[in-house]
Amino acid sequence: MLSDGYHLRRLTDDDVQRGAALSQSVGWSQTAADWERSIAWGGEGSLGIAYGDQLAASAIAITYSPALAWIGLVITHADHQRRGLARAIMQATMENLKNRGVQTVMLDASTLGYPLYLSMGYTPLYEVRTWVGKPKLATKPEAVRAMTQADLFQITALDAHLLGAPRPQILTGYFEEGRGWVIESQGQITGYAFTKPHGQVTRIGPWYAPSPAEAEWLLHAGAAVFQDQTLRIDIPQPNADASTLAERLGLEKGRAVTRMVYGGDAPGDMAKQYAIASFGTG
């Protein structure tokens, strides 16, 4: 039950600037462009609580398939906290997904959000740790080549095996906004890494390879191009090899979130990723 003056509704393109202001109010880094993409990816799962002309709270659920949806951008404006808005919008989001027949829901929980998700029946799986810093000098290995648009079909299939559902819209968006790298074996793509600029930071992920050596080739390919910028990589805690590679490149540990699941076991084999795409997309 929302207090007087608050109104739950679906987010649209008209809310892009409001979303950016919402992120800014809590010190998060999402830009208007980030919000535009996320609202489009979420579609009818993009929900907000409005207060007058202000966006007081948000949650965006991206439905990849009936088997999996991913919730991100769960934010309550700094001026509207401690009024039950986070629980209200999460309950509305979960009801929306249930009505659409989604079987499993996942998210990456901040320290503040973790108790709420736990109380709603989410199960913790493992940490995802951010690594950041200026990379040590690296050169692009010959075994790695630049990703092309034509590669996205194979990459989407490989990524879907790891995630448990296809997300071509996310991968296409990352490719169009940044650059990517692949390794091949007998004409088949076996590993990939996306690099995407975000202000003064370049993010690497999603990042996957069948072996630590090949993963390192991909990491160095991205770092060699963006070595003047700060790199950020979000690494699943079970992938110890990824953390070792990040440390070897000169990156340092940052914040951690808790990956959580609702409705059953986590699909796919996400812990084999060397880096995720983002906290809001998996």
Image (cartoon, grey):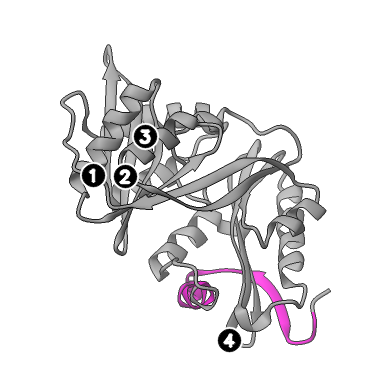
Left or right: residue 17 versus residue 201 is right
Which residues, given as a range, are shown in magenta? 3-23
* N-terminal label among 2 and 1: 1
What kind of residue is marked 3?
Leu
Q: Position of residue 45 (x, y in %)?
A: 62, 57
Residue denoted by label 2:
250
* Residue 66: quarter of image: top right
* N-terminal label among 2 and 3: 3
CA–CA distance between discs 2 and 4? 45 Å
What kind of residue is marked 2?
Gly
Mark 1 crowd level (few <14, some 14–19, many ≥20, 10 Å Cα): some
Residue denoted by label 4:
53
Helix or strand or loop: what does disc 3 sit on? helix
Which residue does the image show at 40% across and 21% down from the upper left? 210
Do callouts 3 and 4 mark residues in contact (Cβ within 8 Å)?
A: no
* Vertical order, 189 against 89 (above or below): above
Residue 5: say if magenta: yes
Residue 66: say if magenta: no
* N-terminal label among 2 and 4: 4
Do callouts 1 and 4 mark residues in contact (Cβ within 8 Å)?
A: no
Q: Position of residue 229 (x, y in %)?
A: 25, 56
* Residue 128: quarter of image: top right
CA–CA distance between discs 3 and 4? 46 Å
Tell me the quadrant of the picture where the N terminus can be found. Answer: bottom right
Residue denoted by label 1:
136
Which residue does the image show at 75% across and 46% down from the upper left? 122
Helix or strand or loop: what does disc 1 sit on? loop
Residue 190 visible, this angle: no
Residue denoted by label 3:
245
CA–CA distance between discs 2 and 3? 9 Å
Which residue does the image show at 74% across and 62% down from the upper left? 92
